[in-house]
C-alpha cells in the first residue's frame, strides 16, 4: 500500500491504485471471457466445415475429418459450458 501514499496527489491516483491492487481479480475475469469469445467465434467456422464435409465423398481421410469435427464440437461446447 506504499504506492498510494506516494501518488495520492497525482491525477488518476485512485484509478492507478485500484488497478495495481486489483490486477489479479481483474485478470481472472478477463481470461475466461476471452476464451468464451474465442469459442463463440469458432462456431461459424465449424459449421462451414461441417457443411463442406457433408458434400465430400466418403474416404478414409473424410472419415478422419469427421472424427475431428466431432472432437472439435465436443471441445467447443464443453468449453462453453464450463
Image: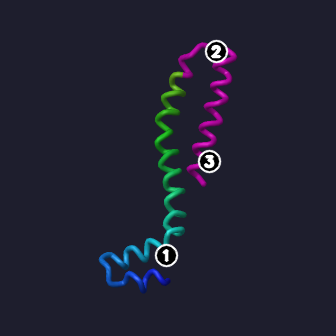
Q: Is 75 left, or right, of 40 in this rendering?
A: right
Magenta-tinted stretch: 53-82
Q: Is residue 60 above or below residue 3?
A: above
Q: At 42% from the left edge and 77% from the top edge, which residue is drawn?
A: 17
**Comparing labels 1 and 3, the label whose residue is closer to the camera:** 1
**Between 10 and 12, which is closer to the camera in this rendering?**
10
Q: Which residue is mark 3?
A: 78
Q: Position of residue 42 (x, y in %)?
A: 50, 39
Q: Which residue is mark 1?
A: 21
In the displayed orientation, state which residue is furthest to the bottom: 5
Q: Is residue 78 above or below residue 4?
A: above
Evaluate if marks 1 and 3 touch, with contact meaning CB atoms under 8 Å apart.
Answer: no
**In the rendered structure, does residue 7 fall within the stretch colored magenta?**
no
Q: Which residue is mark 2?
A: 58
Check the picture and name the quadrant holding the C terminus.
Answer: bottom right
**Between 28 and 6, which is closer to the camera in this rendering?**
6
Q: At 36% from the left edge and 78% from the top edge, which residue is drawn?
A: 13
Q: Position of residue 21 (x, y in %)?
A: 49, 75
Marker disc for residue 49:
none
Provide the secondary structure element on which disc 2 rests.
loop
Amino acid at each position: 500500500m506504499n504506492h498510494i501514499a506516494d501518488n495520492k496527489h497525482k491525477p488518476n491516483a485512485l484509478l492507478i491504485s485500484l488497478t495495481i491492487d486489483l490486477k489479479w481479480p481483474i485478470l481472472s475475469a478477463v481470461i475466461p471471457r476471452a476464451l468464451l469469445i474465442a469459442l463463440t467465434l469458432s462456431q461459424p467456422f465449424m459449421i462451414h466445415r461441417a457443411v463442406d464435409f457433408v458434400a465430400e465423398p466418403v474416404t478414409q481421410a473424410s472419415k478422419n475429418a469427421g472424427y475431428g469435427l466431432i472432437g472439435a464440437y465436443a471441445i467447443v461446447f464443453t468449453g462453453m459450458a464450463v
